[in-house]
Image: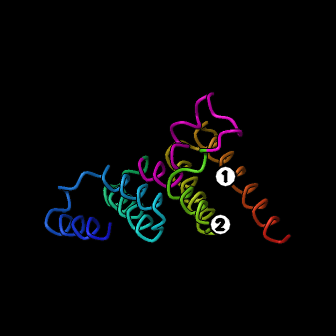
């Protein structure tokens, strides 16, 4: 996988607009799946940096907190969903990097507040997602203390 990373870096250096952004997402997911957290984080951050440079706050929020800004606003979402930790916030949560995950959630919420205002269902959904995350974090800390 290191060879793939080097090839992507070469493509980016030669033509930053020539690499489809979906490849960053795929690489982040694959690196995480195979236990290469540092490389996965790098590709998450590359995606976010591209959308931040473009000023695309909607995509930034989606990448920060995952499907929350799209899927969690629907009625299909419930607290039973095990897949609620998405985006880079979810990645940090799965890595046990609780502080980084919480900060990322809060950054995503700040962006959504800018975009939609405090009363928007999207903001409420992500706040619910953050509450569930904080509960999961508390449960993990309690297990560690035992």
Of residues 65 and 111, the one drawn nearer to the viewer in this rendering:
65
Q: Which residue is mark 2?
A: 98
Of residues 68 and 26, the one drawn nearer to the viewer in this rendering:
26
Q: Name the mark on residue 86.
A: none
- Crowd tier of the residue under label 2, counting other residues whose Cα lies within 10 Å: few below 14, some 14–19, many 20 or above: many
Residue range of the region highlighted in magenta in the rendering: 59-82
Membership of 60 in magenta stretch:
yes
- In the structure shown, which secondary structural element does the residue marked by tag 2 occupy? helix
The answer to whether residue 140 is left or right of residue 27 is: right
The answer to whether residue 78 is left or right of residue 33 is: right
Q: Name the mark on residue 130.
A: 1
Residue at 63%, 34% in the rendered image: 77
The answer to whether residue 106 is left or right of residue 35 is: right
- Crowd tier of the residue under label 1, counting other residues whose Cα lies within 10 Å: few below 14, some 14–19, many 20 or above: many
Question: In the image, which is nearer the foreground, mark 2 or mark 1?
Answer: 2
Question: Residue 34, percent across and down?
Answer: 45, 61
Residue at 41%, 56% in the rendered image: 30
């Amino acid at each position: 996988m290191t060879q793939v990373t080097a090839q992507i870096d070469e493509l980016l250096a030669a033509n930053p607009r020539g690499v489809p952004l979906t490849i960053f997402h795929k690489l982040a997911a694959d690196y995480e799946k195979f236990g290469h957290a540092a490389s996965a984080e790098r590709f998450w951050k590359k995606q976010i940096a591209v959308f931040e440079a473009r000023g695309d706050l909607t995509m930034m929020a989606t990448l920060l907190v995952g499907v929350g800004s799209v899927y969690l606003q629907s009625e299909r979402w419930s607290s039973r969903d095990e897949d609620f930790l998405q985006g880079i916030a979810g990645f940090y949560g799965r890595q046990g990097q609780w502080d980084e995950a919480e900060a990322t959630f809060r950054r995503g919420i700040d962006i959504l507040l800018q975009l939609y205002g405090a009363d928007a269902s999207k903001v409420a959904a992500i706040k619910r997602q953050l509450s569930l995350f904080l509960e999961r974090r508390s449960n993990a800390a309690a297990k560690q203390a035992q």
